[in-house]
Image (tube, helix red, strand yellow):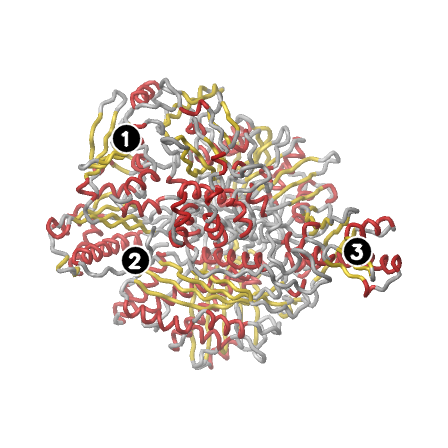
Amino acid sequence: MRFVVNNVPVELAEAAADLTLLQYLRSQQHLMGTKEGCASGDCGACTVLVGRKGVDVMAYSTVNACICPLGSLQDCHIVTVEGLAAAPQEMHPVQTAMVECHGSQCGFCTAGFVVSLAGLQLAGGADLAEADIAVQRAAVIDAISGNLCRCTGYRPIIDAGLSALKKPAQVASFVQNWVPYAPLAGIDGEPARAYGRNLSDGVSDYWQPHTEAALQHLLVEYPQARLVAGGTDLMLEVTQQYKSLPQLIDLNRIDSLCAIHISDDEVVLGAAANYSTIEKALAKLSPEFVALLARLGSRQIRNRGTLGGNICNASPIADAPPYLLVMDAELEIVDSSGNARRELLTNFYRDYKKTTLGVGEYLARIRIARAQLAQPLKLFKITKRYEDDISAVMGAFCWGGQTSNEFKIAFGGMAAIPKRASMTEQFLSNTEWCVAGDVDEEILAQACDLLHSEFSPLSDVRASAAYRMAMACNLLKKACYEFAAEASGKALETRLFSHA
Amino acid sequence: MRRIVVNAELSPATHTGSAAGGVGHSIAHESAHKHVQGTAEYVDDLPLMPGTLFVATGQSSKPHARIRALDLSAVKSAPGVIDVIVQGDIPGKVDVAPVYAGDPLLAGDVVEFIGQPIFAVAATSFVEAQRAALLAKIDYEELPAQLTVEDSLAAQSFVLPQHQLLLGDPEANIESAPHQLSGEIYVRGQEHFYLEGQISEARLTEDGGIHVISSSQHPTELQKLVAEVLAIPFHLVVAEVRRMGGGFGGKESQAAPLACIAALFAQRNRRPVRYRMPRRDDMIQTGKRHDFLNRWKAGFNSDGKLLGVDMLLAGKCGFSPDLSEGIVDRAMFHADNAYFLNNARILGLRCKTHTVSNTAFRGFGGPKGMMAIETLLEDIARALGKDPLDVRKANLYQPGADETPYGQKIEQHVLPELIERLEKSSDYRARRVAITEFNNTHRTLKKGIALTPVKFGISFTAKHLNQAGALLQIYTDGSLLINHGGTEMGQGLYTKIQQIVASAFGVSVHRVMVSSTRTDKVPNTSPTAASSGTDLNGMAAKDACDKIKADLIAFACEHFKITAEQIQFNNDVVVLGEQELAFPAFIKLAYLNRVALSATGHYRTPKIFYDRATAKGQPFLYFANGAAVSEVTLDCLTGEYKVESVDILHDVGKSLNPAIDIGQIEGGFIQGMGWLTTEELLWDEKGRIISNSPANYKIPTAFDVPDIFNVELFDEPNLENTIHLSKAVGEPPLMLAISVWAALRDACSSTTNYQFSPRLDTPATPERVYWALQECIAFNQPSESKALVTRGAI
C-alpha cells in the first residue's frame, strides 16, 4: 500500500493486518512526537492528521493513531506533530501560540493538542477565523474534546487555540508545501488487498474492497475475517487484550456504504459513514441528534467511528440506538450473495450483545423516514463527565404532537439491549398527559410506575440500578415538560447545558 | 470570559542585577518549544538499543490468597520469551518499600491484592511479554479479605499504629458547648492519570552496574532499591530522570518496582530492558490517593465558633504501609485547615485493606483532612442559619487564636486579608443575593456558591528529607550548567532553577542549561514532592552560585585592585569598578587565573521539628494560602451540574515565575475539581478495581473548565527566608477545588431554604448530587416519611 507520512512517500508491502498507525509511526518511522497515553482512544496523546483526497482538495481530520489500523490509510497523507511546521527551523502558528500561552507543562499530551488545534484551523477555515468568540471557543473545545491534559487545567490551551485562530494566513502552510504524489489518486482492481504478511502461524491480510460486490466476494472467501470500519471498538481487542486480528476487511472505501442520501421521503445513512460526516449531513434535519453526537465521543473518535459500528456492536449503552429506535429506523442488511433484507431496529437486538445478523451478513444502510425526523424529539444522556463518557442512562423521546399523541420512548443503559419502553409508550399515547401546556403529574407518576415494571437495570461502574431507574423516570418527565411547553408556546425552563 | 492577567514585565525580585528572563519573569517552560514540536524525549522515546527486552508481569486474580502452585511452563515456552522470574530469583532484598517494610517486588507465597505482580516476563517485544504473562496457571487457596475501610475498622486491622493530636480538653469543651454536631463523610481517592505511564529502562554497565533511566520523582530511591535488589553497592547504580510526563505523587514510590525489575532482567540477561506499564496495568497495579472515612463531633457557640472538635480520620492504605504514615499524618495536620479549633482531638488510623497500596498524590493526605473540617463548618452554618462564609471567617486563625493541634503557632496571618480581598473582588455577597433570587424563581435548576480557603503546611513531615544538593559548572565560554536533586514533571522546576541561576550571575536565562537529574551528579537527594522542589533545590542551586560568585569576586578584587562593592553582575556584563567585561570574557579570565568554576550547593530547611511521642512540634517552615469562590448550577431532576465560574486568589509569596505559578494554580484546581466531581474510583465486591481505564474513570476535559476562571496572585513576600521570598505552589491549589464541592452542597441546601446540609460524599458525581437532593426532599417532608429515602447501591 501507499501513503505519505509528513513529506515522505511510503510504499509498504508487508505488515500485520492489525498494526496500528501509532505502532507504525513510532517503531518504523521513528517519529516519537506521537505518544501512547492509553492505547484506547481516550486521551488523544497520539492524535495525528489524516488527509484524504476529497472532491478536489485534501480533506484532513484528526484521528487517534493508537486505534487506527494502518491498512485503512491507503493513499492518505498522515501528518504528525513533526510535520506541521513549514520548514525544519520554523514553528506552526499553533505551536507558537502554545508556547506563548504557556500551554504545556509536562508536555506529554502537548503534541496531541497541537495536532488537534492545527486540524481545527484547517477544517475551520476563514469562517471560523472571523466568527465571534463564543463560537470560536466552542469550536476549540470541540477540537480538543478527545485530548486529556492532567497538568494545565486546559485554560492556556484553549487560549492558545483561540489565539492561533487569529492567524489564518499560515494555517495551510504545510498543505501548500504538499507535493502531490501521483499514485495517490486511487487504485483500480478489486478485491483490494492493502497489504498483508506471511506469519509463522498463517497469513495476515488487510483487505480494502471498493465495492459491495467485492466485499461479498471476500465474505465468502474469508469467513473468519473481521469487518472493520472506524475500528474505534474493534482495535481495542488488539491494544487492550493483545489479541491478534489476522484477517481484516475494511469498509471505509466502499462508497455505497459510506454515502448519505437525503430524499424527500427518507434519509439513508451508509453504515460506514462516520459520525463527523453524519453531523454535517443532519445538522438541520436532526439537530438534537447532532448535539448528542458531540457527547458520544471525541472529535477524533467521531472522525473514525461509524453508525453501523455503534449499531452492530450491540452494546446496551450505545448512544445512537435509542435515538434510532424512536425514529423507527430500518436496517438494510445484505448477505454475501448480495441479497438484501430490511428489518426494524426494534427487532434487531435479541439479547445482550446479540443481534439477528447472520453469518456472512453485513449492515449496509440505515433508513429513517423524513416524517419521523420532523417530529418533536428529546435526547438526554446521563454521564459522570459531560463529554466523551459512556452513558449511565440514555433516553430518547419522540412525541407525535397533540393530534396523534403517539409517544415513543427508548433507553440505553436500562436493559441488556437498547430497548423501547412499549408499555409506557402505549399508556402515554392513549392518555391526555398534557393539557394546554400543563403536564398532568398524576399521569406522569403512573407512567413512571410502568417504567419500573418494564425495566430492571443493573448497578455497575457508571451508576447504581436505583439511580438508573430514577433517571429513566426523570428524563421522561423532562421530555414531557419540554414537549408540553413547546406545544403550547410557553417559555422553556433553560437547560443546564446548551451544546453548540 | 474575563482573561487572566499575566504580567510579563513584572519587576524581578531582589537579586544581584537584572537578568533577561531571570527571577520574577513569566518566561516559558524550558522545554516548551520541544513539547510543542514533539521533540522532548520521554523514556519510551529513547532509541531502542539492540537486543532490548520488554517486560510484563503476571498478576494475582485474588485479593488475599496463598499460592498453592504456580505453573509457569506455558509462560516460559511462549513465543519471544527470554526470561521469567519469581521472588526466589531476586539476588538481594525482596522488599522495595520506601519506609516501612511490606512491599515485595514480586509476591511470595501470599498475594494481598488483585493485580499484585507474582512473576515477571522478559520477551523480545512488548506484546509478546503481555501475551505470555497471561499464560500462567496459578492455584490459589483463598484467604479472608478485607476490602473496605469499614472491614478494616471492624477487624481493627491497620498497616501502622494510630497517631493522635491533642489540643486542650476537647471532650469537656464539646460537652459544655451551647451546640453540638456530629457527622461523617466518605472521601474517595483519585487515580493520578499522569499522561505518561510508569516506565523504566535499565542498561548494564561494564562494571556490572546499572544505568536506569526512569520516569520517577525519586531517583535516589531508585538507585538505592536497584542496588539492594541486585545486591550491589549504590555507586554501581546511576538513576537518571530527564522529565516525566506528569507525576503528581504517583511516581514518588511507585516508579521503583519497574526500575528494579528492569534492572534484574538486565543483570540476568546482559541485555537492555525496557519496562513500560500499559495504562490498564498502571491503573490496576499502582497506588492511588487514599479513600478516607472522616467522622467528627464538635461543640460550638452561637456565632459558629468552634469550642472543641473530636475527629477520626481513617485512611484506606491498602495492603502495605508505603507512604501512609506521612499521608495520614498530613491529613491530621490539615484537619484544621485554616481554622482555630480551640480544643481538639484528631485521631488518624491507617486501615489495612486487601487492595493496591495507596500512595502519595498532590496534597498527600492534606485534602482529606480539609474535607472533614470544611464539611463540619458548613453543617454548623446550616444549623445556625448563617452563610457558611461567615462561619469560616469566624473560625480563621488569628493573633491570639493561633495554636494548631500539633503545637505549631501560626505566625503569618495571610488568610483574613486574602479572603477579604477575594470576597470583594468576586462580589460574593451580591452574587449570594442574586443566587437566592434565581433559586426562588427556578424549579429545576438551582445555583450554589461557596468560598473556601486553603492553608497548606510546607516542608516534608519526615525531617531528613528537607535537604537538597546542587552542582553548578561554569564553562569558559560563559555558559552555565546546573544540576540539582529535583525532578521535572511539568511543574516548571527546571525553569525556575534556570531563572535562579541566571539571576545570581545577572546573565540571560539562555546561558543557563539545566541537565537531567542524575544520582552520579548530585547524590542522596529527596523526592521531588511535598511542593518542596523549588524551595529546596532552588536554595541549593543558589548556594552553589554564591560559592562560585564569592570566589569570582575575591579574584576580581585582587586582579583589578577594586573592592567587592565595586563589582556587579548585571545584564550579561560584569561591572568591575571603572571597567566592564562581558560575562564570558570575565569567566575566561577567571579560568586563566585558575579560579574554580564548579561548586556544589546544599540546603537544609531551618527551624522545623516534630516529636512523635508528644505529637507537638513545628513540622512546617511556613504555610501557603489561598482561597477560591466557585459558582455552580445543578439540575434537580438528574443531579447533573455545571461549574459556572471560579475566582481564585492565591499566595505564592513573591512569585519566581507568575506564568508558571498560575499554571500550577489552574492545573491544581482542575485536578482537584476532578477528584471531587467526576473521578470515581470503584472496586467490585470481589476486590477488583472496576474503574480501570480512561473509559470508566473520567478526568476533566476542556469542556469542564468554567468559562469564567479568574486567577490572581496575592503577591506578598514570604516572611520566612525562602528562595527569593517565594512560596511553594505545587500542591496547595488542588484544595481550592473544595469550593466546587461546597458550592454543589450549597445548591442542594437551597432546596431546604438553607436549613439542612445533605451528606455529599465525594466524588460528587451527578448520581451523588441526586441522592443528596433526595435527602433534602425528605428533610422538607413531614418527619414520619423521612425514612423513605433510599440511596443507590454504590
Closer to us: mark 1 or mark 2?
Answer: 2
Label tally: 3
Which residue is located at x 54 percent, y 74 percent?
Answer: B417
Which residue is located at x 49 percent, y 23 percent?
Answer: A12
Q: Is residue A339 left or right of residue B760?
A: left
Q: Is residue B43 left or right of residue B592?
A: left
Residue type, label 1: Leu
Q: Which residue is mark 2?
A: A495
The subunit letter for the residue under badge 2 reads A
The mark nearer the N terminus, 1 or 2, is 1
Q: Residue B548's mark? A: 3
Query: Could you tell me which secondary element the residue under label 1 belongs to?
Result: strand
**CB contact under 8 Å: marks 2 and 3:** no
Q: Same chain for the residues at labels 1 and 2, yes or no?
A: yes
The subunit letter for the residue under badge 3 reads B
Query: Could you tell me which secondary element the residue under label 3 belongs to?
Result: helix
Picture quadrant of residue A248: top left
Residue B292: give x, y in percent of width and height: 48, 60
Q: Same chain for the residues at labels 3 and 1, yes or no?
A: no
Q: Residue A363's mark? A: 1
Q: Give the answer, above or below, for where A226 lies relative to B381.
A: above
Marks 3 and 1, how far apart in space?
Answer: 75 Å
Residue A256: give x, y in percent of width and height: 29, 28
Residue type, label 2: Arg
The subunit letter for the residue under badge 1 reads A
Residue type, label 3: Ile
